[in-house]
Image (cartoon, rainbow, N blue to C red):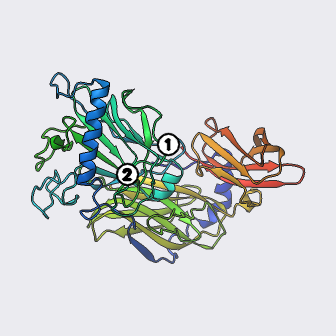
Amino acid sequence: MIKIYFSSTLFILLTVLSIRSFAQNTSIAQSEEGGQYPAGINDAAHPCITPQQYELIEKQIAENIKLLKLDTRQRKTTSTLFSWPLQTSAGLIDCSYYYIGNYVDEDPTSPGVKDYNCGTVTYDGHRGTDICSAPYPFLKMDNNQVNVVAAAPGTIIQKSDGYFDKNCAMNTDTANYIIIQHADGSVALYWHMKKFSLTSKIAGQTVSLGEFLGVVGSSGSSTAPHLHFEVWSTSSSATLKDPWAGTCNSLGGATWWVAQKPYTEPAVIKAQVNSLPAILPGCDTTETPNEDSCFTAGATAKFYFFLRNETPGDTVRERIINPGGSTFASWTHNSTTSYLASYWYWNKVLPATTGIYTYETIYNGITCSKNFVVNCGALGMPTMTELSQVSVSPNPAGNTVYIDMEGMENGNYKISLKNTIGQIIISDIAAVVNNAVRKTLSIAALPNGIYFLAIESGKTRIVKKFIKQN
């Protein structure tokens, strides 16, 4: 999904520098660590919506519908079909960003559970589809990277915002949510969103297909950031529908999706390379990926991948690709356990030759890659001066990069965007007022690769490195 990026000039240089390393394919130290991704998923003891909350919701909806003079009857003249209710924000370039933690429970007995496909990816009494952000769900939430969008056009009939959004257990807290009624009288609930992230539209206003509704969060009764998406055929919770067509669906029959996704989607969600281990503290602390892109020759790095729907008997193929396209090292991960979300990493000794390399993973026929550099300084890249008051995000970046400067002296700062051979591509000025400023640079026209931002004044020079990948 992510490809290899560098210019033809740099390719020729690196080919010459790296030709002696191409035979280094076998002498690689390795160890494997990982397992289930440590993210909470709601369960019968932690339901997304309690019976008392359903009762309150119905009362609020009834009041709003009366005030708005909306028709509550289920109509047969149209039939609602849903598109996917999540989208990533600009700049997030992970190979994917979600997994499904729970489907609707089709088993009316307790404690029995059964999803639409006759499996057990649900919990007793669950009434919706839980779509979980991954990996690093709290980091994605903090940076507004996974958005909730309208799966179908309709009218907002209830909205709740302003409530705590980093819950980790069942409680009676109110969630941030939006409820939308469609042209056929059916209703969709979008639950657990981030505080103050919801659209400014109010009950009675309409939304179009794909319109922004909010950011995935962990408000209300929630154990980690996810969207609880629930469907009723009318404005009553007694008319619950399961939008997924399958053998064991007794609550809807035909699919409600424009294009129904498969029951499982085995894939690599993200690949990354680290000097230090990723920090996965669990709810409700923001994760620290410790992802890096520049390493010392011959050092040991950690090669991570994060999986969705890991399946026993499957194999993930991995390799480090030399600058010229040959294989420096290759290995495999053989799955022995089912996981909805999992992660694995290996410690590998890096090549001794300077260049831009690629870490490639292939799972279920899908490729996910990450570029990294061995010996940035040897390629003429400037030495980095890290200063906590200046940050460049996202990194890797897509079409836009943001420069945030806080706690700086007021004044004008010269900004120079340079490539790896020191050419200045963009020059600009950032005016710091009240000791802070956010500067936005458009990099849509630039080729993928490694870039450096030099931020200078008479007293200060800061250099920040980032990668552009589309």
Q: Nearest the camera: 258 or 347? A: 258
| Residue 69, picture quadrant | top left
Badge 2 density bin: few <14, some 14–19, many ≥20, Cα 10 Å: some
The amino acid sitting under disc 2 is Thr
Is 108 situated left or right of 327 in this image?
left
Query: Could you tell me residue 2's position as x and y percent?
Result: 49, 49
Q: Nearest the camera: 17 or 363? A: 363
Disc marking residue 101: none
Above or below: residue 198 compared with residue 266 = above
In percent of the image, x 21 and y 42: which residue is there?
A: 243
Secondary structure beneath dot 2 equals loop
The amino acid sitting under disc 1 is Ser
Is 415 situated left or right of 273 in this image?
right
Q: Nearest the camera: 290 or 348? A: 290
Q: Nearer the viewer, mark 1 or mark 2?
A: 2
Badge 1 density bin: few <14, some 14–19, many ≥20, Cα 10 Å: some
Is 404 situated left or right of 30 in this image?
right
Q: Which residue is mark 2?
A: 174
Query: Could you tell me residue 431's position as x and y percent?
Result: 79, 41
Query: Could you tell me residue 56's position as x and y percent?
Result: 27, 46
Disc marking residue 89: 1
Real-space CA distance between mark 1 and mark 2, rounded to the nearest whole angstrom: 26 Å
Secondary structure beneath dot 1 equals loop
